[in-house]
Image (cartoon, rainbow, N blue to C red):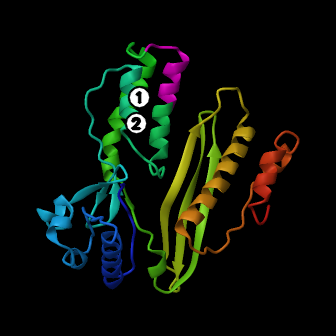
Amino acid sequence: MDDVLTSVSDVETGIKLVDGLRSMLAKAGFRLTEWLYNEERILAFLPEKELAKSVQTHSIDSSLQERVLGVERNVQSDEFRFTISLTMKPRTRRGLLSTMISLFDSLGLVAPVVLEARSIYRSLCEQELEWDEEMPEKDLHRWEKWLSSLPQLRNVSFPRCFNLNSYENMQKCQLHVFADASTTGCGAVCYLRAVDRNGNVTCTLAMSKARLVPKAETSVPRLELIAAVMAVQLEGRVKRELNSTFDPVYSGQTQLLFFKAYATNAIVFLRSFLDVWL
């Protein structure tokens, strides 16, 4: 059984959720363990032997870290962080792949960082290097530069919970999605933007997607069309996962209208989702 990750709006709801889950699964002979909350009042409701080992021996403070879905989570601040442990790997195609997949990022929070590693790996594959063959000097320089940048990720954090139901006096809540493309890659990013009645604005990165461009020679306008489709798909996925109501945002890319001759399917797809074309 895999871990469960969820949020509640207050302590009372959290206690009811814990009690309900334990009671329901106990009827089938299951016992939930490894409980971990960033609220000590909920933890106090549970038997100590059912708590996560980290909170059995450690109080909840800024130093308490747990892994959630492959990503480090600071329990007290309830934020995702990327702690990279760089071990010496051979400067080969095999070593590059091993290091690259160790940076697990299912939400695309650091997608631009991962994309650079993918670009280097593609270069090695295109040169048909053996798995344990040393990298060429040019690729080795790019790879070492990428490795040296990874420790900077420790200075970046992302809130785990958007807490949509507890924004006090929220006047407007929108999803803002951006897309772009280059000759190296294309991608889309989605931000959650909330405005309260006092005009205070909160923007949070929700999710992003990035991919390398196709190997076949493709014009930048075509790649921007691919990015636009990615943006619409990304917005739809975020809406489904958050299961909340958002205020509409009207936008469009006029240049996409010129590609009907060879991109009819993509244009139809985009038109079915975008409310207004400017």
Name above or below for residue 109 compared with residue 123.
Answer: below
Residue sitting at 25 percent across and 63 percent down? 33
Disc 1 from disc 2: Cα separation: 6 Å
Write down the quadrant of residue 16 in the picture.
bottom left
* Relative side of 237 to 34, left or right: right
Q: How many numbered circles does the render carry?
A: 2
Residue at the limit of the structure toward the front, as seen here: 28
Q: Position of residue 60 (x, y in %)?
A: 19, 67
Q: Position of residue 14 (x, y in %)?
A: 33, 78
28 vs 97, nearest the viewer: 28
Write down the quadrant of residue 144 in the picture.
top left
Write the start and end of the magenta stretch as one range: 119-130
Quadrant occupied by the C terminus: bottom right
Residue sitting at 30 percent across and 78 percent down? 19
Residue sitting at 37 percent across and 62 percent down? 4
* Relative side of 231 to 46, left or right: right
Q: Position of residue 96 (x, y in %)?
A: 39, 27
Residue sitting at 77 percent across and 53 percent down? 269
Q: Element under label 2? A: helix
Q: Main secondary structure of the magenta part?
A: helix
Quadrant occupied by the N terminus: bottom left
Name above or below for residue 22 compared with residue 160.
Answer: below
Q: Which residue is mark 2?
A: 101
Residue 61 seen anywhere in this rendered image of the structure: no
Q: In the image, what residue type sits under mark 1?
A: Leu
Judge the density around disc 1: few (<14), some (14-19), many (≥20) Cα neighbours within 10 Å.
Answer: some
Residue 231 seen anywhere in this rendered image of the structure: yes
Which disc, if any, is residue 97? 1
Given contact means CB atoms under 8 Å apart, are the residues at marks 1 and 2 in contact? yes
